[in-house]
Amino acid sequence: MPFPYIEVSGTPYRMGREHGRQAATQIHGFVQHLVNCSGRSRVEVLTAAGRFRPLFERYCPLLVEEICGVADGAEIPFEEALLLQIRGEASPLLAERACTTFAIAPTASATGALLIGQTSDMEPELEPFFVVLHLHPDSGPRTLMWTFAGQLGYHGLNEYGVAHFANSVWGGPAPAARPARGINFPPYGLPHYPIKRRLYESRTRQEFEAVWAALPVVSSGNYMVATGEPAIFDLEATPAGFTVLEPVDGVLAHANHFLSSRFRTAETDAASLPDSFIRQEQMTRLLQERVGELTVEAVREILADHEGHPCGICRHEETDVRRMATVAGLIAEPQAGRFHVARGNPCRGDWTTYTL
């Protein structure tokens, strides 16, 4: 069964309200899940989320309007709708998990089509909270995303041929130290999710990097990127800045540890998931072995690979101590405006194709 599909249009507020109305049940459940998993009271979690509001108002004012619409459509307070855009930054217990991203330049594919995507790995109980969200704004590009219900920025593509997917990375530079002044002290930067939505305003690599240069981020993350030239590159982003990795033989792969000489250290390696290094090597090898032969079907096979089971590219639950599995496989064809989404482990073959 595919993920629920939500299509909205209009002003930011109208899109948010219709999104909230159509996904109200999932949104209520997701908010409660975030609070339950935080280990903190509802008031504490919403207070922590509220610290980010001034940054949203400064850097993402149209998203604030859309968040208001989500809140009204789902009949929840604004603070709960804001929490959906912050997630892991409100509590360390809600951090991102393990994912494996890839990108294939036109020169490396069998058909001359650029391909990009990932597996998304996290606690399996989160799977019911996802939707495929199709946006038709009055102003700005049409955008197609796989995202949490109520969350306005995540993995996908826009009508300009820009697509981005992401990995968590650990141990990167921290924000510049400031004196602590309690829970209401403003954070140092934006969460990744509003930035991910702002990135869909881009048309080119230059514009994409300019958005990153203009927006402060509160934690580290990795972005696999395609732009409309067409081109692919990988961007490792931290509060101390970002660096770009270029394709080798027309392909790129990234797991959950830093690869750039600027950010990778013995300390960041030690902070990373041990299986990240295995998945990095396996994804890179599988792509390079099929350069010139890579198609959507070939990538589906790669995303279903079980080398290192249960912690492979297609990840299955490990133990009761660390419950994590691939909840979705994602493949975008940005130039064609197609988005292929598998619900659950890609090895199950449960794929649905969406078109911008």
Image: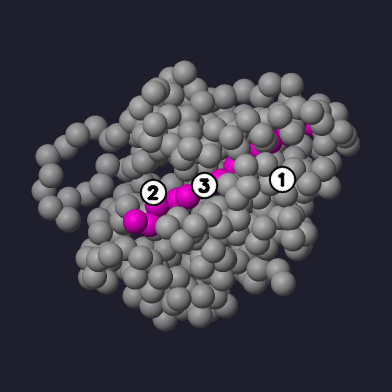
* Placement of 40 over or under 94, stated as above or below: below
Image coordinates of residue 121 in percent, x first then y, are: 55, 53
* Placement of 66 over or under 25, stated as above or below: above
Of the residues shown, which amino acid type is indicated by label 3? Ala
> Magenta segment, which residues?
93-106
Give how far apart the Cα atoms at labels 2 and 3 are: 18 Å
Give how far apart the Cα atoms at labels 3 and 1 are: 15 Å
How many neighbours does mark 3 have within 10 angstroms: few (below 14), some (14-19), or many (20 or more)?
many
Of the residues shown, which amino acid type is indicated by label 1? Asp
Nearest the viewer among 255 and 190 is 255
Disc nearer the start of the sequence (2/3)? 3
Image coordinates of residue 71 in percent, x first then y, are: 41, 73
Nearest the viewer among 59 and 38 is 38
The C terminus appears in which quarter of the rendering?
Answer: bottom right
Q: Nearer the viewer, mark 3 or mark 1?
A: 1
Q: Where residue 305 is drawn, which disc sits there?
A: 1
Q: What residue is disc 3 on?
A: 98
Q: What residue is disc 2 on?
A: 191
* Placement of 215 over or under 186, stated as above or below: above
